[in-house]
Image: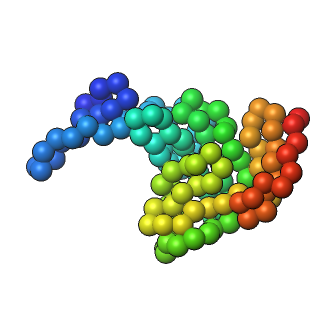
Amino acid sequence: MKRAGRHALACTWAGCKLQPAVPDRPATVPAEAVWRGGAEGGAWIHCEPALRCTVWQEDGSVAQRGRFVRSGGGTGAALPEGWSGDAILLEGGGQLLPDGWHEFPPDLRVRYEHGEPVEKKAR
């Protein structure tokens, strides 16, 4: 696979196509986190079994941290497909909605009830 800016050229027996490249993992992002993104950018996402998740920006800074609840369709493991800015979208359908207090560094905390923001506090 050859990198071309924010894209990589992936070739298989079926041919070649340009795909978004996974950026280098910042030191602040654990090895268990997965990259989900495209040409416009993306996020590193890691969820623990109790659905306590952290989302990092491409540069490794924390974008969101808190507990989530599963909502919508989908079956099987909750594998992240993307991040909407507060919810984590899942492969195969469904999403993880923020629930309880979430941190949005550097200075915002938001309390959610099943995905709906109900209180905000600046630090």
> Residue 44 falls in which quadrant of the image?
top right
Q: Residue at x 51, y 61 (%)?
A: 90
**Residue 27 sits above or below residue 113 on the image:** above
Quadrant where the N terminus sits is: top left
User: Can residue 67 be seen by looking at this rendering?
Assistant: no
**Residue 16 sits above or below residue 99 on the image:** above
Q: Residue at x 86, y 51 (%)?
A: 119
Q: Residue at x 81, y 38 (%)?
A: 108
Q: Position of residue 91 (x, y in %)?
A: 46, 62
Residue farthest to the top? 5
Quadrant where the C terminus sits is: top right
Query: Does 68 sit left or right of 118 as displayed?
Result: left
Query: Does 71 sit left or right of 80 as displayed?
Result: right
Query: Does 57 sit left or right of 34 as displayed?
Result: right
Q: Residue at x 81, y 34 (%)?
A: 107
Q: Position of residue 30 (x, y in %)?
A: 58, 43
> Residue 95 falls in which quadrant of the image?
bottom right
User: Can residue 59 be seen by looking at this rendering?
Assistant: yes
**Residue 34 sits above or below residue 77 on the image:** above
Q: Position of residue 64 (x, y in %)?
A: 69, 44
